Structures are given as C-alpha cells and as structure tokens.
Image: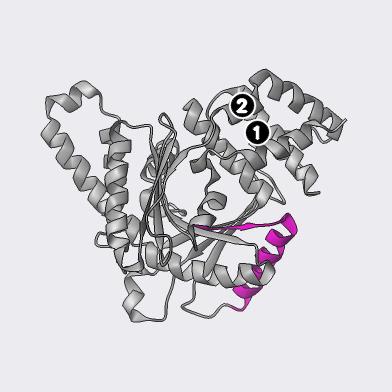
Amino acid sequence: MLLVTPQHSRTKVDAAGDELIRLLNMSPADIRNDTAKWTSAFEAALAVIGNWRLSHNWPLLSVRTTLNGRAASVSQHAIIAQRLKRLPAIVAKLTRFRNMKLSQMQDIGGCRAIMPTVSHVERLAKIYRQAHSARRKNQPELIETYDYIAKPKSDGYRGIHLVYKYWSRNPRYGKLGGLRLEMQLRSQVQHAWAAAVETVDIFTRQALKSSIGDDRWKRFFVLMGGALAIRENRPLVAEAPADKKALSDELRQLSSDLHVETVLQGWGKVVEQLPRKTSGLSAFLLVLDPDGKTLRIQAYEQQEIKQASEDYLKVEREILRDSRNQAVLVNVKSLKSLRSAYPNFYLDTTAFVEAMQEACAIA
C-alpha cells in the first residue's frame, strides 16, 4: 500500500475545504469573468484535499486488516470493503454542516463489514468493545461508538459506527497519528436499505441520505427502516408505527403511490465494462453513468495505488464541475465482492425489493 503522509497543516486543509465550497458556489457568470483564476484556485484546493484524503489510506489499511480477521471469526460470509470518501460527498457534508471543518471529518477513510445477520453485527461490535478495553498505547483508539441499531436514526438508518483515531508505535507513521477513520457494521438487510437510499438519490437527484428531498420518499424509507427493525427483532424506529399491521398498511399504500417496485426495477441493470485482468488486484475504480446505465470498472494492482488515486481524482474533477456520474475507489477482496459491497453502483435493488414485499405482505 502506498504510504502518503499529510503535506499541509490542518489549518490549510480546512481552508482548502472552505475554498472548494466557495468556488463551487460561484455563479457561472463570475467563473467566466476569470476562468483561469477560478481553475487555478480549484486545482490548488483539490491538491491539498487530495493529499489529505490519500493520507488516510495507510491507517485505513491497518484498521481494515484487523477487521478482516475479526469479522471472519464471527462469520466466514462477512463482506469487507474500504474506501476513501468521495469528493462530492465531502462537498455535500461541508455544505450541510457549515461549522464542520475538513480536518475534523470522521469518515474521510472508511471501511465496512456487511454481516449475514444483526446478531453477527452485534457479536462483532462486542469483540471491538472488548479489544478497546485491553488497548495498548500507540494502537488505534476507539473514540466514538454510534449504535444505530439500539437507537435507530430518525430517517430509518440502522447499523453500528465505530470511529477511530490512528496511532502507531512505528515512528515511520508518526505523521499519520490522530487521523480519524470510521468503521460501519451492518447486517445484509440494513445494507440493502442504505444502498436503496443511495440508488434513489442517484436517479431522482435528491439527497435522501442527508434527509433532503421528497417527503413521501423520506417517509417510505422511515417505514422500511421500521419494518426491518421489526424483522430483526430489535429496537423500533421511533418515527414508524410500532404495530406491524399499521406499519404494513401505511407502507403498502405509500409504496403503491410512489410505484416503488416499478420504479426501482425499471431502472434496470447496468452494462458492466469489466477489467481484462481479474486476479491479483488490490483496488477498483467504479464509475457509474446513470443516464447511459453503464458501469466502468478499472482495476489496479498493489503497486498501482498511486495511479488509482490520480485517476479517481481526475474523474471526480469532472463530476464536481458538471456530471451526473458517480465514482468510488474501493478496496475489496475480489470483483465478486464489489456487487455485494456497492449494489447501488450496479443499480441492484433486488434484496431491498424482496424485503419490501415481505414487509408489505404482513396482514
């Protein structure tokens, strides 16, 4: 894995984040008045942000390696993935939370474990709690736990998030000390819910993931979050009916009004443009064109991670300027794991639709 360390102070990183938001909020007329100046400032901000983001790669690999072993000890069917936060997602978060600074963002580097059941998720979380109690100095430090299974979010989201600060006893990694990473632990149905939200966002140009958009769609996902909580026999979503029949009746009516099943299935499947090589790979760049319904997958070997990061940033430049495309750079074990880890990039809502049909069938 390529070792990249922060080359700029946190003050400069925060300033670059603020500058990027300012530049993207400028009117087209103001940009045209001095395109060269705008472009220069845009590239300068991206350079600082790109270095800051890429600096999370090594700490993320360390955390993911541990996650691989711990998740496998709970279930051999665990799916593990890691990613660096997408630039459009960084922009959206900084825009939504105006007091947030880029250097304080906890999920620039993130990894995810998708477990077969909610019981597997809870067992894995327990392993992490026990490990933290026996933590030694200069090991990654668990600083926050967000248990959205015990207390679901108001929008219906459920899962467990663990936030770490990276530390190492090796002086080589001293400059990486204090970088924050987020780990998401989800069951398969919890993950299907989250992926469906992102898929709807892509095609309807909403931001349901940030609780922004059509109230009917927001209510639909609250109800589905509640239905899945009941299905998993876990604490209910406060904003959804606690009574199974009442929830099912409202969900059935709303899904009918929105034509949810027809809409989700109508988006169809993507045409995959697969890499020629399928083994010995370390990272995958996924670029989804929702209009053309094509998914281009570019693969990279371990020694090509720097090139992967440069290609990722190049694609994101175009997306930030004017593109509906979606892109993410992912580390998973195999091509097969990609679909399970990122079904929204495949427009695959099969698991979610099946869960919805089951929830609507309750009489």
Residue 147: percent from the left, percent from the top? 66, 54
Residue 323 to residue 297: above or below = above
Residue 61 to residue 9: above or below = below
Q: Amino acid at mark 2?
A: Trp
Quadrant for the N terminus in the image: bottom left
Residue 133 belongs to magenta span: yes
Residue furthest top in the image: 257
What residue is shown at x 35% (from left), y 67% (from top)?
302
Q: Which residue is mark 1?
A: 221
Taking the image as shown, residue 20 lies to the left or right of residue 341, namely left
Kindly identify which numbered label has been placed on residue 336.
Answer: none
Location of residue 315 (image quadrant)? top left
Residue 267: percent from the left, percent from the top? 53, 29
User: For numbered disc 2, what is the local secondary structure?
Assistant: helix
- Whether pointer 1 and pointer 2 mark residues with C-beta atoms closer than 8 Å, the reply is yes
Taking the image as shown, residue 176 lies to the left or right of residue 205, namely left
Residue 52 belongs to magenta span: no
Q: Is residue 206 visible?
A: no
Magenta range:
109-134
Q: Which residue is mark 2?
A: 217
Residue 160: percent from the left, percent from the top? 63, 55
Nearest the eye: 170 or 278: 278
Residue furthest front in the image: 276
What residue is shown at x 70% (from left), y 50% (from top)?
149
